Amino acid sequence: MVAAGPPVLAGNPIIQTIYTADPAPFVHEGTVYLYTSHDEDELVNNFFTMKDWVCFTSRDMVNWTHHGAVASLRSFDWAAPEISGWGGFENGAWAPQAIERDGKWYLYCPLHGRGIGVLVADGPFGPFRDPLGKPLIAGNHIDPTVFIDDDGQAYLYWGNPKCWYVKLNEDMISYDTSIGEEGLVVLDMTVEQFGARTKEDEKRPTSFEEGPWLYKRKDLYYLFFAGGPIPEHIAYSTGPSAEGPWSYGGVVMPTQGGSFTNHPGVIDFKGRTYLFYHNAALPGGGGFKRSVCVDELRFKDDGSVVQMDMTEEGPEPVAVLDPYERVEAETIAWTGGVETASAGENRIVVSDIDDGDLIRVRNVGFGDRNPGKCSVSVASEGPGAVIEVRLGGKDAEPVAEIEVGATGGLDEWKTFSDEVTGVKGVHDIFFTFRVPEGGGFRFDCWKFH
Ligand code: FUB
């Protein structure tokens, strides 16, 4: 658990309930699907301790709905811990990326030291299965990035210390073996393509370190990457095609944020462009306990990238959240204290709610409808808890105080309500929780009506 205290006005890091790293956002039908790797709370051997890949969604870039782990090392038979041969423990679920093609979702997963695998599902949250039963790219390869060009040709880039690619076939789980070394093309690691390194490194002749990310804007292709030496920064190159040749463009984000790695993920969403990255900003954070953040990425007229800094504020909301539809309680802009848990198939709920914890949900649009009630669905161990609902600030007068009655247990769900009056316009909602001894509860969803 991450003990995320104030400031409640922060937007970054965007996930506070667990440590997340290696952001891989993907836009599909008005929603951002954000896949990340997951740094465990308990480190083994004081090193990366990573077992699964998690997913979050947003329609407004400020409230993120938690969907939990969608795949793990156990999704790959060939990665079973007893055969891993790597460190002797279950580990190595490093930076993933997902993409949708013709209704199927493909999740490319590096298993550190064992290769890059691919999983397939009928939807963004799985269930994901391994269609190959072996690595797509075998060997010591990490950090895949997948991209489908306008002509339908798909590419998988990856690499550390070199940058590689394959041209994926239309099935997205095999590649054209007629190019490179049986299909694998290694880029020329030249200063022209990736910029000069400021510190000599035998294996790395340029500033390219790892974490490539392919992106296209107008007719220009961009290869963002984590640059070295460590601690990493984010840099980019541009080219006339998805296969280059690349010209080094410069630094996008200097070394900042307390983590010795960084990792770019770039998308366009609702007319803006965003850079996802990670840092060590949450309490207890560090190089092996990282947190994903997002900020707007800007370009100059000539297509070059405007260098930027990490921020605490994060981006502005780009949509209002509708409180008259069921809203999952795990849709969160900021939380201090709570966690999320699985409550059965495809159901994630807010759990581990302690007295004084809070959840902030941003930019909620009430319009002129003047709702009469706020209802919550909860499951409780006993009576006595109260959900206070405030608008605009955590210290505002509550507009509702919903008493949570006994429901018969943490898996028995009931709806409780309180009356509200005079609620109009667009506000941030702050749910704060009063939890007496024996009155623990889990929170599934809420709505105004
Ligand atoms: O998360 C493990 C590794 O750290 C990733 O594969 C790299 O990109 C770096 O972020």
Image (cartoon, rainbow, N blue to C red):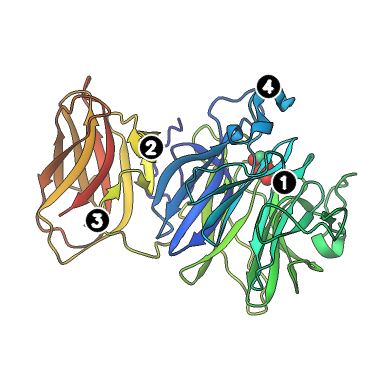
Given contact means CB atoms under 8 Å apart, are the residues at marks 1 and 3 in contact? no
> For ligand 1, which image quadrant applies?
top right
Residue visible at 61% across and 42% down?
Answer: 130
- Amino acid bearing label 4: Glu
- Amino acid bearing label 3: Glu
In the image, residue 301 above or below residue 391 = below
Dot label at residue 345? 2
Q: Say whether disc 2 or disc 4 marks the residue closer to the N-terminus.
A: 4
Q: In terms of secondary structure, where does tag 4 sit?
A: helix
* Residue 406 x/y as whole percent: 16, 27
- Return the residue at label 1: 136
Q: Quadrant of the N terminus?
A: top left
Residue visible at 13% across and 43% down?
Answer: 417
Q: In terms of secondary structure, where does tag 2 sit?
A: loop
Dot label at residue 325? 3
**Residue situated furthest right in the rendering:** 202
Q: Say whether disc 2 or disc 3 marks the residue closer to the N-terminus.
A: 3
Side of 82 relative to 141 (left or right): left
42 or 216: nearer the viewer: 216
* Residue 140 x/y as whole percent: 78, 39
Q: In terms of secondary structure, where does tag 1 sit?
A: loop
User: Mark 4 to mark 3: distance in Å?
Assistant: 46 Å
User: Mark 1 to mark 3: distance in Å?
Assistant: 42 Å
- Return the residue at label 4: 82
User: Mark 4 to mark 1: distance in Å?
Assistant: 21 Å
User: Mark 2 to mark 1: distance in Å?
Assistant: 29 Å
- Amino acid bearing label 1: Leu
Q: Say whether disc 2 or disc 1 marks the residue closer to the N-terminus.
A: 1
Q: Is mark 2 within 8 Å of ligand 1?
A: no
Circle 2 packing at 10 Å, graded few (<14), some (14-19), many (20+), is: few
